[in-house]
Image: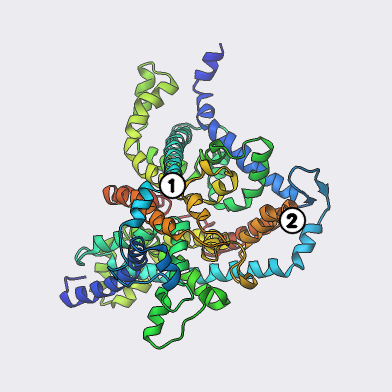
Amino acid sequence: MKKNTALNIVLVVIFAVICFLILLPFYAITLASFKPGEELIRYGLNLKLDFSVMSLDNFVFLFTGDHAYFTWFFNSLLLTVVQVVLTLLVSATVAYGFAAYDFKGKNILFICVLLIMMVPFEILLLPLYTLTFNLGMMNSYSAIILPGIANAATIFFFRQYLSGIPKEIIASGRVDGASEYGIYARLILPVMKPSFAAMAILNGMNSWNNFLWPFMVLSDSHKYTLPIGLKTLLTPYGNNYDLLIVGSFFSILPIFILFVAFQKYFIDGMTAGAVKG
Amino acid sequence: MIKRFIYSQKVAPYVFVFPFVAIFLVFWVYPLLSSFGMSFQHVTLGQEAEWTGMDNYQKLMGDGVFLKSIGNSALYMVLTLVILIPFPMLLAVLINNKWMWGREFFKSAFFFPALTSVVVAGTIFRLMFGEMEGSLINSVLGVFGIEPVKFLKGHLTGFVALLALATWRWTGVNILYFLSGLKNIPEEYYEAASIDGASAFQKFTRITMPLLKPTTIYVLTISIYAGLAMFIESLMLWNGNNSPKNIGLTIVGYLYRQGIEKNNLGYAAAVGIVLLAVTMIINLTQLAFSGMFKKED
């Protein structure tokens, strides 16, 4: 296609309209975070820019008020960091096993990896719930972290990445007398570093936003993660909008900042599955 | 001796993949089998289970609420496919050029919604689709002289809200999927078609669509799965698992209600097995029809 100003304008207008619609909910929640919750209950979520009712009160309450928001926030942060580090290490190790060796049962095992991506995790919720209950692991973070530690999509991505690394590295390592594990730890892991960023972000985002399984496992409100905590602010007996709205707004911020800083890795991570190897 | 064994080149691969095997057996195979077993039993947490054969499945077939939840999930899946495949594909084709103003900005902006958790996004949409006159959507409708709508009280209007949420969250992601597929189509094809005098529409239907097939199949597969397994969107929009007349109840929602809320684990397991079967059948049929199982050339 040639450069064409008229076409360009038409395209930009179309995309600007869609973009406006997509950003509208963000604008609405940002606006609402400056208004008292009472306003929201009385008039609904709207786009009225009324400075007479807007203030920083909600933000003051968020940072100084008597509530568990930052306990949830740091729980989420801790859980996300631990989960990402463990998932990346375990998945990379498994992927290396698949990529570097030929061994009996390799194909069947790899089909299992693909199968995991096809089975809805939701149907495992109840048996996992009873298993966790029977193991006495209810209300613990390990029950949340462990099932996801060998993440199928991450293994798949790392294996693809490793298949592009020359086998000579491994061979030369063996000539130098390094052990199989030494080769992985000292020669391969450093080369894999660039691929870690995309997967760290993908897993981090999933973990930060993860809701259903942690919601079923955790019952102690001191252990709640952010999405669970926010959900508890909505009750059948009336909603704590003052904290809910500003808290929701603030929970998006860390991911937004990461996204703006590491956009390329977000996109690589999200589209990893769709690129055929 | 043991050290030599573990360090040998034959054993090392098994050591590397061991974590996967362990997790797979404990957290996938075992739960799947136990779910299957539970579906033939009457199970309550902390009590002795009791075999009841096909009872759970027989009851399910006559359970109106369950059938309604299947209908809702199926409808949701079909509608998300209808919206979230053609439009993102078209938008990806439109934005896939080097000269459009602000294309990088649009791509990022479209992706923003995917960064939010369903809890936060659901809360925002619940409020936007509130029934008050001043709620966002109703205030827009008011401009056109339309009376305020109680969105979350009606089946049709409730689905409008659900689909708006899904479209908002996934359009940008699907655009990215299609863009990564478009990257693999050689520019020369289009140049050759131009020389032969093909119109833009012909290029789209004869070159772009066929060559995007692998990407489309991927998006289709994950969308079928995500559509049938949808739950939290509904949970957040209706602020709980109980929507009026179950208009927002999904299969997983029913599984959750029976299993967790009513502690009727055997019955819920049967719901899960039906969901697994339906998902597998639809996806395998779809993959077979699109020729995924044929030898690739």
- Looking at the picture, does residue A52 appear above or below residue A264? below
Residue pictured at 75% horizontal, 66% vertical: B61
B31 over B251 or under it: above or below: above
Tell me which chain the residue with mark 2 is part of.
B
Judging depth in this view, the residue of B185 and A84 nearest the camera is: A84
The image quadrant of residue B102 is bottom left
**Residue at point 69%, 66% (across, down):** B66
Q: Position of residue A118 (x, y in %)?
A: 55, 52
Residue B6: mark = none
**Number of other residues with Cα within 10 Å of mark 2, as a class: few under 14, some 14 to 19, many 20 or more:** many
Find the residue positioned furthest to the top: B1
Q: Position of residue A33 (x, y in %)?
A: 36, 60
- Indicate the position of residue A89 as horizontal and vertical percent values: 44, 33
Helix, strand or loop at disc 2? Answer: helix
Q: Amino acid at mark 1?
A: Asp
The residue that mark 1 highlights is A66
Disc 1 versus disc 2: nearer the observer: 1
Q: Please tell me which residue is depicted at 54% across the width and 24% down the height of the picture.
A: B11
Question: At numbered mark 1, what does the secondary structure look like: helix, strand or loop?
Answer: loop
Kindly indicate whether the residues beneath marks 1 and 2 are on one polypeptide chain. Answer: no
What chain letter is assigned to the residue under label 1? Answer: A
Say above or below: A10 vs A266.
below
| Residue under label 2 | B267
Q: Nearer the viewer, residue B98 or A163?
A: B98
The single residue placed furthest to the bottom in the displayed view is: B145
Residue A266's spot in the image, x, y percent? 34, 50
Q: Can I make out residue B247 in this image?
A: yes
Residue in the picture at 33% in, 30% down: A190
Quadrant hosting residue B230: bottom right
